[in-house]
Image (cartoon, helix red, strand yellow):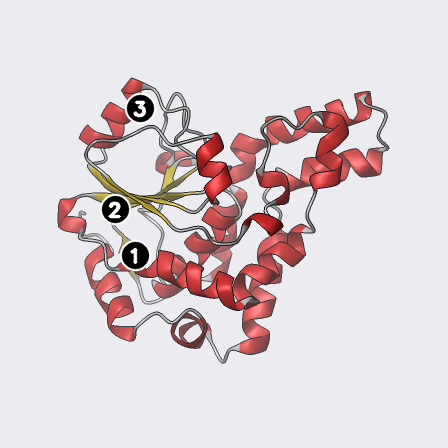
Amino acid sequence: MGGRTIHLDGIQNARDLGGLRTTDGRTIRSGYLLRSADLAGASKEDVTILKEKWHLSTIIDLRTDTERWERPDVDVESADYVPIPVFDEQVVGISHEKGLGASQIGAAIPDMERLYRMMVTDGSCRRDLGRAAKCVMEHDFAQGSVLWHCTEGKDRCGLLTMVLLLALRVDQQQIMEDHLLTNEVNGPKAERYYRQMLAAGKTEREAGAVRDVFLAKASYLDSAFSAMDERYADAEDFLCEGLYIPRASIAAFRKNVLCDMGVRS
């Protein structure tokens, strides 16, 4: 993850979007936009780092009610906590890791490409994804940074990141590169589940399907891009008409978090 990695003891897959460049020659300011896996395992030192180094002032939790109940985030006193589930309990699937052994986990596998497509086509998902994006865009960055997360910091978190980066005019190649950085963290976990499935008597194909759920694959995000391209004229149309985000919110977001290249943030 290079210089954008946020090193924490109990919070996985954390990184800063600062430093990514836009197609109109600007750069995202460092220390404004943070993404991660859930904060359930955050240590006291993690909380101190988030408060004192990153000045965290808002946490957006994209998980379902059940997921939040099973693994509640550790409280970060300085930050407002905003739960915005992106989809309902019936489509969670593999997000519910708690209590699943290798023999049960295979039955919980969703079709990941279909899941990504659904998150940008289903009306309820689009409304919630738009609400979450609007919450980030209208954040008061003078108060500090905003962090959003799901369970793994990969799928729902990744889709919200895609939306925000599209709004900032970051190209799809950089969006994909950021998406795939998750594998630096999740690769070992995915391999562990793969071995557990084989040990439980599953075929290599079944074990590979489970492994792939825990990885960020290009085909997943491509499914979302394809669904977006099929229905909307361009990214701006998707943001405004598909996700119901006001153009004024997008303009203010760009003004607040972008700087000209070479300008220190």
Residue 211: percent from the left, percent from the top?
A: 69, 35
Residue 113: percent from the left, percent from the top?
A: 66, 55
Q: Residue furthest left?
A: 142
Check if mark 2's residue and mark 1's residue have beta carbons within 8 Å.
no
- Image side of residue 105 versus residue 160, left or right: right
Is residue 111 visible in the rendered image? The answer is yes
Closer to us: mark 2 or mark 3? Answer: 3
Q: Is residue 71 above or below residue 127?
A: above
- Image side of residue 140 versus residue 175, left or right: left
Residue 141: percent from the left, percent from the top?
A: 18, 50
Quadrant housing the N terminus: top left
Helix, strand, or loop for circle 3? helix
Q: Amino acid at mark 1?
A: Cys
Is residue 176 or residue 104 the one in the foreground? 104
Mark 2 vs 1, N-terminal side: 2
Q: Amino acid at mark 3?
A: Asp
Residue at screen point 75% across, 36% down: 106
Q: Which mark is residue 14?
A: none
Q: Amino acid at mark 2?
A: Tyr
Closer to us: mark 3 or mark 1? Answer: 1
Q: Which mark is residue 32?
A: 2
Residue 138: percent from the left, percent from the top?
A: 24, 59
Residue labelled with disc 1: 135
Is residue 20 or residue 140 the one in the foreground? 140
Check if mark 3's residue and mark 1's residue have beta carbons within 8 Å.
no
Q: CA distance from mark 2 to mark 1?
A: 13 Å
Residue labelled with disc 3: 46
Is residue 219 visible in the rendered image? The answer is no
Circle 2 packing at 10 Å, graded few (<14), some (14-19), many (20+), is many
Q: CA distance from mark 2 to mark 3?
A: 17 Å
